[in-house]
Image (cartoon, rainbow, N blue to C red):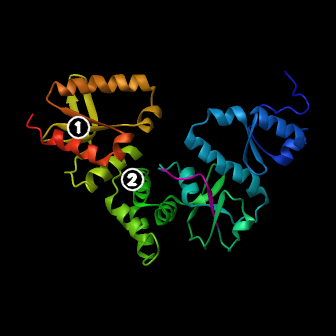
Amino acid sequence: MTKRGLGELPMGMDLWRTSELHDLGLNDRKIASLLRAGELVRLRRGCYIRGSTWTEQKPWVRSRQLIAAHAHGTLPTSAGGLVYSHTSAARLHGLFLWDVDDRVHVTTGSTASRTSHGKDVVPHARALRSGGVVFLDDMPCTSLEQTVVDCCLMLNYKQSLVLMDHALRMGAAVGEIQQMCASLAGRNGVRTLRRALENADARSESPGETLTRELLQRLGIELPELQVEASSSEGHHRLDFAWRKKKVALEFDGKVKYFDYAPTAEVIYRERQREKALMAQGWTFIRVKWQHLFREQQFKMSVLRVLRSPG
């Protein structure tokens, strides 16, 4: 068994407070040296992570790690009333977030000055309702429904719709969200909350699919069905969007769809084989990538050209 040398990072741990590094025999000069070498990464004041661990993590994992770093450095010394909320709670619940920063949101029962928190922390003060707090990865956070409401009150409509779609897919109680929504009349952001709830669809499987649906609706294009089942010589398939009568399918090609579930090359190959088999039956495919969602006029003309084609 290899012994750890004095001043070296131990195996089996990845996250440390400054005091814990000192206990391991690392003084401030050694910590600074490890930071320069990339062996340590400072996540926030007084909290560090192993550099190799940080480098290997995906962006959404890093976002959760920042919350874990705050908890590691704060919860042991807090008075016990701190709860992670808003987009931080959304990350702990595993909800999709689009174009949202990594600041840590916390809610407490008493008013706290912003200066009592780090610059990366957004404090909120309010009494949390009974049953409004759950524990995820041993960290206290707002319930799924409360998290959805809090986020929609501060996010824009597109961001809210992405989150609402996924929350409903995860089983969020619509009735509970509606009740909270009714009690918030006149609050800033409540219109966005209502609109997102009205237009949400639990069948959406990724932020890209949600934003594609939102764009189709906003451009006044006839809305397709979602997650349509179709059969071909290759077997049974499911299409992201489809206009059945026209035999037109719209598929979103996005990293979230590919990289989370299988190797990219394998997934692309299977989808192309499926596409060829369905095209042999008269289907036409429109493929949408992230960049197309931000070229709205080009997107509109491309979709209408296919939908209006007599073939």
Q: Residues within 10 Å of mark 2 (few under 14, many from 20)?
A: many
**Along the line of sight, the residue nearer the viewer: 297 or 116:** 297
Indicate whether residue 102 is drawn in magenta. yes
Indicate whether residue 239 is drawn in magenta. no
Residue that appears at 30% across and 50% down: 213
Does residue 280 appear left or right of residue 29 in this picture? left
Residue that appears at 59% across and 41% down: 61
Q: Identify the residue under disc 2.
A: 165
Q: Position of residue 105 (x, y in %)?
A: 61, 60
Magenta stretch bounds: 99-107
Under mark 1, the amino acid is Ala
Numbered circle sitting on residue 249: 1
Q: Is residue 137 above or below residue 10?
A: below
Figure quadrant of the C terminus: top left
Figure quadrant of the N terminus: top right
Does residue 248 appear left or right of residue 1 in this picture? left
Sequence-earlier tag: 1 or 2: 2
Does residue 185 appear left or right of residue 201 in this picture? right
Secondary structure under the numbered disc 1 in the rendered image: strand
- Viewer can see residue 149: yes
Residue that appears at 35% across and 51% down: 202
Q: Position of residue 146 (x, y in %)?
A: 51, 64
In the rendered image, the residue lying farthest to the left is 310
Q: Residues within 10 Å of mark 1 (few under 14, many from 20)?
A: many
Q: Is residue 308 above or below residue 81?
A: above
In this figure, what is the number of numbered marks?
A: 2
Q: CA distance from mark 1 to mark 2?
A: 21 Å
**Along the line of sight, the residue nearer the viewer: 105 or 4:** 105
Q: Is residue 152 above or below residue 259?
A: below
In the rendered image, the residue lying farthest to the bottom is 186
Numbered circle sitting on residue 41: none
Residue that appears at 90% across and 41% down: 27
